[in-house]
Image: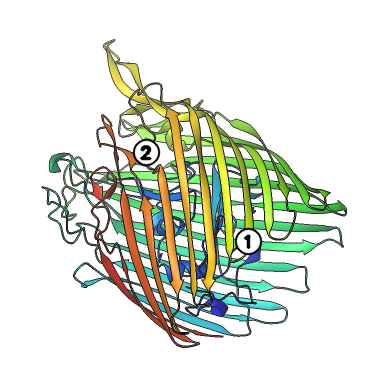
Amino acid sequence: MPAPAQTNASGTAASDDTTFGLGQIVVTAPRVDGVAIGGDTLSSNAIFAFDRQRLDDAVNLIPGVNASNTGGSRNERLILVRGFNRFQVPLLIDGIRVFLPADNRLDYGRFLTSDIAEVQVAKGYASVLDGPDGMGGAINLVTRKPAKPFEAQVQGTLNLGRAVEYGGYNVAGLIGTRQDKWYAQASYARNYTDHWDLAGGFVPTASEDGGHRGLSQSRDWRANVKAGFTPNDTDEYSINYTRQEGEKLAPLSTTDPVSIQRNWSWPYWNLSSVYFLSTTALGEQAALKTKIYYNQFDNLLSAWDDATLTTQTKPRAFNSFYHDEAWGGSAQLDVRPVTGDTLSLAFFYRRDRHVEYQQGYPGGAFEPPQTSIEDGYSIAAQNVAELAPALTLSAGVSYDWKDLRRAEDYANGAYVYYPLVNHAALNGQARLSWKPDERSELYASVSDRTRFPTLFERFSSRFGGAVSNADLKPERAVNYEIGASHRFGIWRAEGALFYSHVTDAIVSEPFIYTSCTPGGVCTPNAVTKSFNLGHGNFYGGELSLTAQILPSLAIGGNYTYTHRDLRDPGVPIFRPTDVPTHKAFVYADWSPLTPLHIRPSADIASDRWTVNTAGTAYFRTGHYDDVGLAVDYDISDRLTVGLGARNLLDQNYQLAAGFPEPGRSFFARISARYG
């Protein structure tokens, strides 16, 4: 929802900033106001204006970032940043990493946006001061902080299908206070999807009859509570608690035979985090920033006999339980030894504890829990020096390492103990910026970063189809970028050219291993195994334009070109999936009357590579022109009502083979606020 001081449909910037500064990460592009779409940040105003209730849908507005879908039995929503996937771009909430140590298969459709202040996306150049694994960038959800003595807000959206039938709802609310030396706030967001509709042009198949998409129901909610102490102008101490819970079904492939489809659901997909953030001035030349946190992740994946999701009697049925915990923290010391020079030193520690077990059918027997424990460390240093009044050089280096303490599995009635192999990586980066005036910037950067493999990549048997590789090394990418921004008259322009060289990419290769019985009978087995054999190059460009044409009319848009040449030596037909070659977003904000705002928009994308379920064929799909419209009316300074539509052209398209996207839909909304 829009920030309290920025909630009217006009999207006018406010003097009071409700963004939680302690929870921000380092991004290099300037923030934008109102509903404008910036190069690195997305405001709560823009999220509300274009009705982007899920994280994947919201960041699709940003140049260089695109949303996609895994398809398959998991049917998870994806975010890719300049071609880098969810394993290579960390997700953070208030600067605290959300990480699933087993496989890090984050489903971005589970993260709601209606109660956050802004989304930050560091592309290519992710500062070493924000922690390890930023191989291709970083995504940070920044929560809200109250700015006034009393604030309250409620927002509700009714989602409607193609026939304007009930499709679900989204609600959010907050209450907070800002006093002289302290603040407190509580917020809540909930999204319920009863179903979504396929486009009218969809042709029914054996597994999908069209209309309401089968098994498309989901529920998600998130709550955030914070309290802060601000004893003076420089120091701040904040304790925070965030919890989100999700439940979802998984639509079936519309093209695969019913007999081979997996019928999966997630009865719960829950995350929680309690964390302490602080900044303390140490005299006039230094400051100390700290983060301490404890995170939990609980997940149940259930496999059923058939698409009715009512019985578990066949050998294909199971319940897979994950229980993960992480605790750790970081400390960053900023020192200004001389005017125009800041040296920052940071240390990170994190322990991940993963516990999993499974209930198998028929019979419903439980296997014993298996536990894996891994410690992660990072030491980072960055120096920001003003070489001249308009010239700034940032240079950083970090050393990251992982200490695998325990890695267990359970197979054939006995525990399996994997080798405890540790890994380390050195990272470096630099950025040179020239700002000849307050309207312009030219910059160039290089960032050499790595990403450590997950437990899944090292040890998972993939339901018996793979063998482990404990020696799997980190992936690496060297990211180069040159860019510029300039404001001329009513126009503001931002642009960048980027190139990434990827080495040691983790790929799954065909592998033959021989198993022998106690009697000496040996059998060759065709499986897969993960290796650091992938390599390639990503390159492209981004351009964003915004303009206030008239006092009552603002326009904007951005365009991204991305080319990926990634090779998998063991799979000659392999193509990198999920990223369109061309992507754009254009919009207008027209106010023919002061309280009325009409916002037409269009998401546009070209084809992208996808792969069939068997992995035997790659092909291009996914072209779309998704036209949207939102109309909002300010009944008063405290109350706004609106109507809108998505995919007005009712285009029938798919981002992953066999998994079509929603057709035309409508919404009605209301937002009330005080303060």
Earlier in the chain: of badge 1 and badge 2, it is 1
The answer to whether 518 appears left or right of 228 in the picture is: left
The residue at which mark 2 appears reads as 577
Say which of 250 and 589 sits in front: 589
| Amino acid at dot 2 | Thr
Q: Count residues near mark 1 (Cα–Cα under 10 Å), then give few for <14, some for 14-19, many for 20+.
A: few
Say which of 583 and 27 sits in front: 583
Residue 282 sits in quarter: bottom right
Say which of 322 and 488 sits in front: 488
The answer to whether 345 appears left or right of 128 in the picture is: right
Residue drawn at (39%, 44%) of the image:
580
Percent position (x, y) of residue 417? 45, 30
Furthest residue in direction bottom, as rendered: 636
Residue 671 sits in quarter: bottom left
The residue at which mark 1 appears reads as 488
Looking at the rendered structure, the secondary structure element under dot 1 is strand
| Amino acid at dot 1 | Phe
